[in-house]
Amino acid sequence: MATSNHTQMAVLGGLSIAPMTGYALREEIRDTLGHFWAESFGQIYPALTELERAGMIERVDVDGRSSKFRITAEGTSRLRELLAEPPQTAQPRDGILLRVFFGRQLGVEACRRLILDSRAQAEEQSAELNAIRENLETAADEDSPFILITVLAGIHRAQAAIAWADQALSVLDGLALRSERQKSSTEEQS
Amino acid sequence: MATSNHTQMAVLGGLSIAPMTGYALREEIRDTLGHFWAESFGQIYPALTELERAGMIERVDVDGRSSKFRITAEGTSRLRELLAEPPQTAQPRDGILLRVFFGRQLGVEACRRLILDSRAQAEEQSAELNAIRENLETAADEDSPFILITVLAGIHRAQAAIAWADQALSVLDGLALRSERQKSSTEEQS
DNA sequence: TTGGCCATGTAACTTGTTACATGATTAA
DNA sequence: TTAATCATGTAACAAGTTACATGGCCAA
């Protein structure tokens, strides 16, 4: 499979920060871009092969089984080219919202659980990112302000998810209350 | 291509609200789930064929070139089954954040433009969804509270995107200021 | 000596988009 | 009569995940 521009972008971008092996690249991407990006081995290794063939990256520190890759001058200009392309926003797909949308079929209780779970996850994420944020705010290298901005995005999103969950739960409470009243008024009629 | 569970979920879900043609289904999905879900014709038509063969949906109003589909009892129970499956959150991929992350390569000005664009989009989205929200809050049918919850999610996200953009821009301003000062102090030294 | 991590790579599969082909109906 | 919209469907392509295969190194 020919690798996508996006994967090339992530790979070249990673190597623009420091030379490393394919394995380390995956780890780096998972740990630092994890909250808004993902690449699997099945993408990274073919991308490395392709980029090397095109002279965008080169091997250094070849030591038998493993080798670090370094970005070349052509690679850097290719990276800048890719970054300058307009970002095509992928179609959003949110399994939780899809389930909530059809909540009448799923049932109020199951909806509540879904929302509570996603709230808990957002809390966790927010805490994690805030820890990273503190380190970044004192860092002085050239990359960290940009990294900080992406972390702030994650924090805002997590906070929004929490606020949404609370509001959603109160809507569901109102729903439960209403059906409760309906039930009792039906009983009175009978 | 065998259709995915998610597409089946969306198709069965759509038909659980009202019987309609494949074409109308696409429109409905685009217009009401649009801010968190997408399906293309290439997914919908094979899914309809498959679901019909499995007895989950059936044709009504066949009029030569077009036919409406209605969900059957088996279809409804299949839908409930699918909805109850744990939502697997797809790997997030945000092209804007990826570009900002490598902002040192992309340049501060290009970053600013990206962020401003995404802010404008979020403003638009927020306005659109707020209009929908007003209609939903007065609606009284059984589906609308759930739909309202998904709309609220979109509004919270859009607001978060706006707040993030403003914060990000102020980080970039600080960066520009700092490099400005560095330049002038270098000039003093020379 | 065994299990875990580092490291590389491939193949099969799943998922989804886009472009194309076709044709009816309807409004300007 | 011509363009837009409704409607259905397929084929080619693109993108990405997962599982598998392989093997060295190191610590308990």
Image (cartoon, coloured by chain):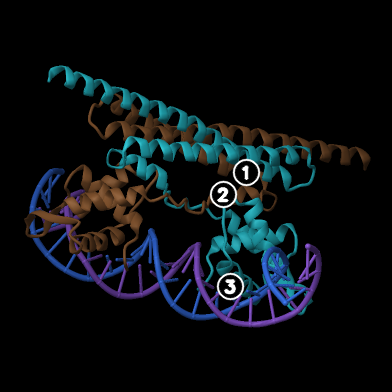
Chain colours: A cyan, B brown, C blue, D purple
Cα distance between the residues tagged 2 and 1: 8 Å
**Label 1: which residue?**
A150
| Residue type beneath disc 2 | Phe
**Label 2: which residue?**
A36
The secondary structure type at the circle numbered 3 is helix
Residue B18, by quadrant, is: top left
Marks 1 & 3, CB-CB < 8 Å contact: no
| Residue type beneath disc 3 | Pro
Work out whether disc 2 and disc 1 sit on a shared chain. yes
Residue B57, by quadrant, is: bottom left
First in sequence: mark 3 vs mark 2: 2
Marks 2 & 1, CB-CB < 8 Å contact: yes
Residue in the foreground of this view, choosing between A176 and B153: A176
Q: Which mark is residue A55?
A: none
Determine the chain carrying the residue at label 1: A
Determine the chain carrying the residue at label 3: A
The secondary structure type at the circle numbered 2 is loop
Q: Residue at x 42, y 50 (%)?
A: B86
In the picture, the quarter occupied by the C terminus of chain A is top left
Q: Is residue B149 above or below residue A31?
A: above
Indicate the position of residue A130 as horizontal and vertical percent values: 66, 37
Question: Could you classify mark 3 by the number of other residues whose Cα lies within 10 Å: few (under 14), some (14-19), or many (20 or more)?
Answer: some
Work out whether disc 1 and disc 3 sit on a shared chain. yes
The secondary structure type at the circle numbered 1 is helix
Q: Is residue D14 above or below residue A187?
A: below
Residue in the foreground of this view, choosing between D19 and A152: D19
